[in-house]
Structures are given as C-alpha cells and as structure tokens.
Image (cartoon, rainbow, N blue to C red):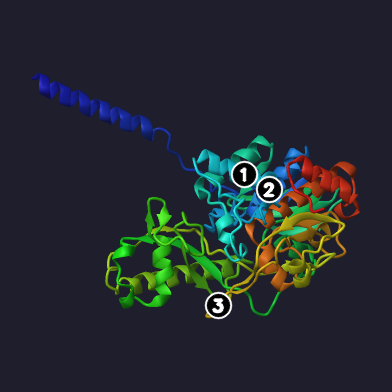
Amino acid sequence: MERRSLIKSLGAFSLGAWHSALDQGEKLADPYVVKHTKLDTDVLVVGGGTAGTIAALQAGRAGVRTIIIEAGSQLGGTTTTGGVVFPGIFHAWGKQIIGGIGWELVTDCVNEDGGELPNFSIIPNNTTIRHWQHQVSVNGALYTLLAEEKCTDAGIQIRYYETPTQITTSDTGWLVTTVGKGIEAEITCKQIIDCTGNASAASLVGYKLLRDIDTQPGSLIFRIGGYEYDALDLNQIPKKYHGMLRQNQIISGKVTNPEGIFPANVPYGYVYVPGADSTNAELHSQANMQGRSNLLKLLRDLRTHPGCEKTRILDLKTETAVRETYRIDGEYKVTHQDYVEGRVFEDSISHSFYPIDLHREGKSIYQEFLKEDVVACIPLRALIPRDSANFLVAGRCVSSDRLANSALRVQASCMGMGQAAGAAAALACIKGVTPGTLPISEVQDLIEAHGGIIPR
C-alpha cells in the first residue's frame, strides 16, 4: 500500500474510532424534574437592582447570612440592564452628600475602567439645572462584574432567574416560596428587603400600596451611529431628532456640542414607552416589545433624511427602564414639600439630591430645582410598610407622593436607601427585633461605619 493511501486509511480508522467513542455516552433519559430545595438565611433581598445590590452588600458585610434573588441574569438594574450608565447624584453644592457602599462600587468601577470623576467642586450657575455635570459615567458591563464580585466576597448567595410566588409568616420570621428555571425553593428568613422597584414582595405579603392613575413613560435606551453630526444639514432633519443625533455622535470621547442634557462622554438616546409597567411578566414583556417597536420605527424614519441614510444601531439595552409603578404605604410618606424644603427627620438615614423630575409623554419634563444649599432627606420610616414587622423596602417603591418619588427614584438615592435597609435588617437580626423598634442612632452608626453619610 502506498504511503498516502496508508495515511488516509489510518485517518479514516481514527475518525471512526473517535466517533464510536463519543457515541458510547448516549442513552435514553427520563425527563428531568424540577429541583426542590430548602434554604435558611437571616436576610433575604428580593431584587438585585440599584438598591438591592447595595442592601445585600451592607447586610452581608455586617455579618449576617444574606441571600439575594434576582429575576434576571445580572445585578445592577437600571445601571446595567436599563443602561442608565451615569448614576447620580452623590454631590450637592460642592460637597458629597451620599457615600457608602454605592459610592464605593461606582468609584471602583471608574478607577478599574481607567476613567475620571467629574470635578465636584465646580458649582456653575444654576447647578441643579445642569445636574448632569455631576453625574458619574460608568462602564455598565464592568459595573455588573464588580457588583457580583463584591457580593461573592461578602459571602452573599446570589440566585438568578428566581422570583417569589408566595410569602407567609413562619416561626422565625418569613417563609418565601420562589420559582425559577427548573427550580422551586422554600427560603426561611428573619428579615425581607423588597428592592423590586414595584413593591412586588410587599404586595405578596398583603401590605397596602400606592399608585397614581397616570404613570411616567419608561425609556428604552440605545446608541446609534453611521453618520457624521457635523456634516448634517439640520435644516433638512426634523428638530425633534437634533439632540438625539448630537448626543450619539462621539468625537474623541466628547459630544460635538457638550451643552447637552446628559454627561458629555456618554452616547445616549432613548425612546419613550407610554405606560411602561414591570409589575408582572406579561406587562413587562409588553413594555419591552413596545420599546423595540418604537425604536425600529425611529431608525427607519431617520434613514429617510439626508446624511442619515446609513444610520444603524450600535447598542440596545436589554429592557425598557421603568420610572414609576407602585410605592408602599409606609409608616411615613415623604411629601413633595418635605423634599423641596430639605426637611431633616429624627430618623434620617440618607440624603437625596435631584430635581423633581416628572416625565410626561408628548409634553416637556416637569422639573423643580432645589434652592441653593437645600438637600432632601429620607427617613427610615419611609422604608417600612405601615403596620408591618421584619420587612423593609428600598428604591423607587419607597413611601412617597408622586412628585417626591420622581426625584427619589434616581440611582444614588436608591443606593443610600439600600444601604440603610441592609443596615437596619442586619441589626434587627442580631438583636432579634423588628427594624422599626431599633434605636435609630445604632442604625445610623452602622451606616457611617461603612462609609455612609447621615443627614445631621
């Protein structure tokens, strides 16, 4: 046999032997069954978004067993899945007013990404009008990685793709039934922190909620390219697209016109989604699909204008970011007047600094800017549902009226609330009491021990 034929036959033999070896592992298997598991923890955080991640980190670092369940695939919420990659606001009137674990995560993200922080000492005229100048740009993907790493380092158990279906009281506190991809779990815990944004866990317990007849539209965030902004004849393009085209055109890390409404190094566009609601899978699906449909219509329309014929999508966020659904009816409701006057409460646990910011479909955004040196505050009682025990919330479902909530819902404020809820829940576990009965000074001291800033 010739050498070439011998090699060919050996190759065929080897290939056949290889396939035969792989085939040996195949067998008929019974359908896999849903896994049932039982878990026990001190603190259960429901929702791994902006507030939930920080709440879990605070509880875990305070030394109590902590589990966080998240219906999606990653931590970070609005900053990551929603794509608002410029969390704020941590500074007001030339000084820092929100710090702690949220600030640590944000600054670590900036540093590891080789970025720079804004110059917070600069106070331009009407600084609250240009509040975006003090928002911090982050890499959303890196933020997700760091949040997960920090939770793992703190001993926190992260459970993705799970959501609670039933919450009842137990001898030690709560029994929470969850379902997820191929799994059902029963989790017993002493304290629950609802960070779903929709007060979903509070609703399952039966606590009363607040909601307005009208709600703000959601936003589906995207980035586009394929055109040169400076070469466009804006007289031939509808004015409603000018700001979007400018903001999405980046040259050497800056928009061509830095006087925009977002940080100058963030390419950013969004389409409104009227009535966007994330309180159940059906409504959330509708919000996401409507946002994508609106974007497709926008893209096709842009391409009909001179210079925009090659416009294309460079990035699209996973979900429509929702601004407003349900809020708890808490032991105290933060009012519009409380917010704009900067009322300091005996049980204040965090600051908030953002203009009243009510988005309205088809109309301009309604805004009220805080007067000079005014900074709003959040009381612990606003995180506690009325007549509840061993239960807290953090994030945009905080007890507040609609106007106050339109400012409280932003990321830095939600991080401050998350850290406070995590501190109160951890102390309540350690002392065997419900959070509302804790000496507020002890909660404040624990927050400050982890870098938080308490209104005084």
On screen, 343 above or below 186?
below
x and y, in percent, of residue 449 in the image: 78, 40
Front tag of 2 and 1: 1
Looking at the rendered structure, which numbered label has been put on residue 234?
none
Q: Are marks 3 and 2 in contact (CB under 8 Å)?
A: no
| Viewer-proximal residue among 183 and 46 | 46
Front tag of 3 and 2: 3
The crowd level at tag 3 (other Cα within 10 Å; few <14, some 14-19, many 20+) is few
To which residue does mark 1 refer?
A: 105
| 3 or 2: tag closer to the N-terminus | 2
Q: Is residue 76 visible to us here?
A: yes
To which residue does mark 2 refer?
A: 54
* Gap in angstroms between the C-alphas marked 1 and 3: 33 Å
The crowd level at tag 2 (other Cα within 10 Å; few <14, some 14-19, many 20+) is many
* Residue that appears at 84% across and 54% down: 390
| Viewer-proximal residue among 172 and 274 | 274
Q: Are marks 2 and 1 in contact (CB under 8 Å)?
A: yes
| 1 or 3: tag closer to the N-terminus | 1
Q: Secondary structure at mark 3?
A: loop
Residue 38, picture quadrant: top right
Looking at the rendered structure, which numbered label has been put on residue 364?
3
| 2 or 1: tag closer to the N-terminus | 2
Total labels: the figure holds 3
Given the image, on which type of amino acid does mark 3 rest?
Answer: Ser
Of the 4 image quadrants, the one containing the N terminus is: top left
Residue lying farthest to the front in this orientation: 125
Q: Secondary structure at mark 1?
A: helix
x and y, in percent, of residue 198 in the image: 68, 64
Given the image, on which type of amino acid does mark 1 rest?
Answer: Leu
Q: Is residue 403 left or right of residue 329?
A: left
Given the image, on which type of amino acid does mark 2 rest?
Answer: Ile
* Residue that appears at 61% across and 73% down: 216
